Amino acid sequence: MAETTTKTPVYALTREERRFVGLHLVFAFAALTIGSLFGPLQALEHAGLDLYPTLEKFGIQSYYQGLTLHGVLNALVWTTFFITGFLTVAIIRGFQRRLAYPGLNQFGFWTMVVGLLMAAVPLLLNKATVLFTFYPPMQASTWFYLGLTLVVVGSWIEGWGFYATYWQWRKDNPKTRTPFIAFASLITMVMWQIATLGVAAEILGLLLPWSMGLTDGIDPQLSRTFFWFTGHPLVYFWLLPAYVSWYGMLPKQVDGKLFSDSLARLAFWLFLLLSVPLGFHHQFVDPGVPAGWKYVHAILTFSVFFPSLLTFFTVIASLEYGARQRGGKGRFGWIRALPWSNPSVTAQLLAGILFVFGGIGGLANAAYNVNLVLHNTAWVPGHFHLTVASAVTLSFIGISFWLVPHLTHKPLWQPKVALAGVWTYFVGMLIFSNAMHTVGLLGAPRRTTLGLAPYVPAEWSGYLWRVGFGGSLMWIGIMATIVVVAVTAFRKKELPEGEFVDVPVAESIEDPQRTPVWLDSWKPWLVGTAVLVLLAYGPQLIDQIFGMSATSPRIAP
Amino acid sequence: MSATTEHIHIDPTEKRWMIASVILLLIFFAAVTVAGFMLGIQVPTRERRVDPNTVAEQPPWSEPGVREIVPGEEYEVYVLAHRFSFTPNEIEVPVGAKVTFYVTSTDVQHGFKLQDTNINFMAIPGQVSKLSTTFDEPGVYPYVCTEYCGLGHAVMAGAVTVTEAP
Ligand code: HEM
Ligand SMILES: [Cu+2]
């Protein structure tokens, strides 16, 4: 079984809207395809099989050029294009109305595309081999920084189109609770807008003038502080759209309902409040940040664990409710009653399982003294392949299994291949991430061609071999799912006349109108967020900006 | 719809879960606080700023290496990170002594991780990273660069040899 069809969709997107969202997915999946290509190559390099000499023929000149492409295309491009497209659907379907200014959203999208192309050229020419964190004073081509800026600004503009649509809807519906999926999408975009102020300041204020030769030197520590202001909430920008699906759509796909509308909203508000003011936890081992501030951010980092635990409960309760409707019995026996034959559901369930492991590992990263052992070891990529490459990417792939049929009116091609793909990826990920975590604990650095490193002890080799094996499985799995999505999009066969694949939108058990107004009001939460960000960052930003010493010259990678 | 019917619906099981979550959080807060303030586990803090363009010409980094502060008990080690090696790349200290590392970079960002110890920090141009450790066992402890710094990054490493007490 694949997607469920209906003859009477609740609200159908127009042809133009479907095409517009589809374009987002074309770019997203193209980025994921190219970005993922380097995954197994990196993993195999660690295992002792260096395929990079062969790649030189294709213009890839080093492991690190490939790693930059892997990070930028997967973590920045795949995510941002998928998210803006998917949230467009959530906004339109949530409010059940057209976008207020479709032209504005289109302008935002094409800005992103121009930015992507601008950054792609230096990336492919090996003129921006600075990894996706682009730490100065290692310097990339100016076009790379400009391109990234345009991608971010384009995503902002798409967000503004969402806000305008909300205001129009609100004028017509002054007393109604914001429909949940639209509500959650708006929070995601607002959080992103606040979060990206850091990287905007870094690029516009420091990197661009310096790379163009307008300033001679740069302060690498200040750049890091700006970067991580954005770098951590970036993770929540990836995750929250997956939560939109887990809370607001997946329950419907398993015949369930959203367990608690109020607590789902509370969790989203807490993510808005707490995502930004904790970036120093990426800088626990930076020399230029006082230890006291590291402690403050460590405490705040643990606080985000609270809405995560709320999410864990609500999502599982919603799934269980559905499974019991489907006849599931027993304390854990209900799990078997979930529709595991539906690849869209299975992808998201497996994403959730991997995310539980990721969450536990994240706690270790957050403890600032444990972080001393783990920082910049293979543990870290081991960790975030459970989050961004699993919880997020597998969920987005699962969403695509209904979204592409929804957009194209075509049935999913080979649901069995889709299922096999997500299971293979899941198993590969378990092996890969387990080995990465362990070898990281033993001291293996990340972002390193370990095959060339003189200090690799024999003790690591068993784990590195498993990194290579698990990574190869992951690639086979993810490619199978990408092929399913691509063939579905471009196949000839259409759904039977008059049948549609609807956007799955879960009802909540309680009438949302009974959710308190303060859980549907922007002002208190926006003010709270601003205050918290100012308190957590203000003093250090002032200190570091006024104490800036721009002494580092431009250095080629 | 009147305001009186508004309420947050919280299922009893969910309420217990939320309480447990809060307690768990408090335990984590306590654990970090105890480790940081009472067990004296240290993270790098602001030490001093230097000019990466001239730091290698001025003391103390004009002569990087080991300084004996109290023989057998206290040592300082000044290390320069630059593409693609550390200066010095061989260090010798006796077992049981308190050894404080001061590391900075003369070019791009590097990392400095001393295997099997608590020392792991960034080496950022313009900043000085400082942490101390005590080696309880004689042996060879490699230190490796943990931040991508260019094509030769993987070979950027050195080793501390910890000798038996004299
Ligand atoms: C297809 C399967 C994949 C494999 C086998 C794989 C493998 C790897 C490996 C081995 C590294 C570490 C390289 C190093 O530290 O030297 C890495 C880094 C990374 N991967 Fe993946 N990966 C895969 C898919 C993904 C996906 C789907 C995403 C995100 C959506 C992702 C995001 C990243 C990021 C952000 C990094 C860090 C890059 C950096 O350190 O600059 N990967 N990957
Ligand atoms: Cu280095």
Image (cartoon, coloured by chain):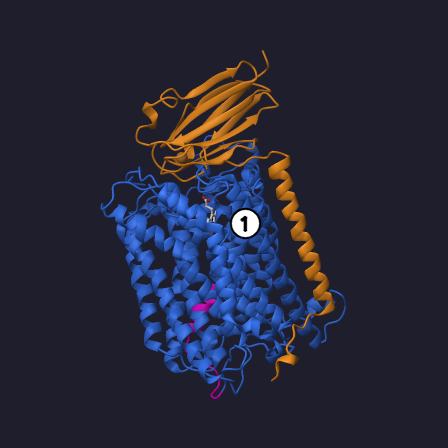
Which residue is labeled 1 in the image? A383
Secondary structure state at the residue bearing disc 1: helix
Count of labels in the image: 1
**Residue A496 among those drawn in magenta:** yes
Q: Nearer the viewer, residue A176 or A132?
A: A176
| Identity of the residue furthest to the right in this view | A330
At which x and y percent is residue A535? 49, 52
Give the blue chain's letter: A
At which x and y percent is residue A114? 29, 63
Q: Is residue A302 left or right of residue A486?
A: right
**Residue B68 among those drawn in magenta:** no
- Up/down of B68 relative to A407, above or below: above
How many C-alpha atoms fall within 10 Å of the one at disc 1: few (<14), some, or many (≥20)? many
Asked if the residue at label 1 sits under 8 Å from ligand 1, the reply is no
At which x and y percent is residue A415? 54, 70
- Up/down of A485 relative to A219, above or below: below
- Is there any visible trace of residue A123 in the rendered image? no
Q: In which quarter of the image is residue A379?
A: top right
Give the orange chain's letter: B
What subunit carries mark 1? A
Locate the N terminus of chain A by quadrant: bottom right
At which x and y percent is residue A50? 42, 41
Q: Which residue is drawn at 40% across and 40% down?
A: B148
Q: Which of A451 and A196 is in front in this view?
A: A196
Q: In which quarter of the image is residue A437?
A: top right
Q: Residue at x 69, y 54 (%)?
A: B23
Q: Which residue is drawn at 50% across and 82% down?
A: A174
- Is there any visible trace of residue A146 in the rendered image? yes
Residue kind at label 1, given as amino acid type: His
Q: Nearer the viewer, residue A327 or A235?
A: A235
Locate the C terminus of chain A by quadrant: top left
Report the span colored magenta: A482-498
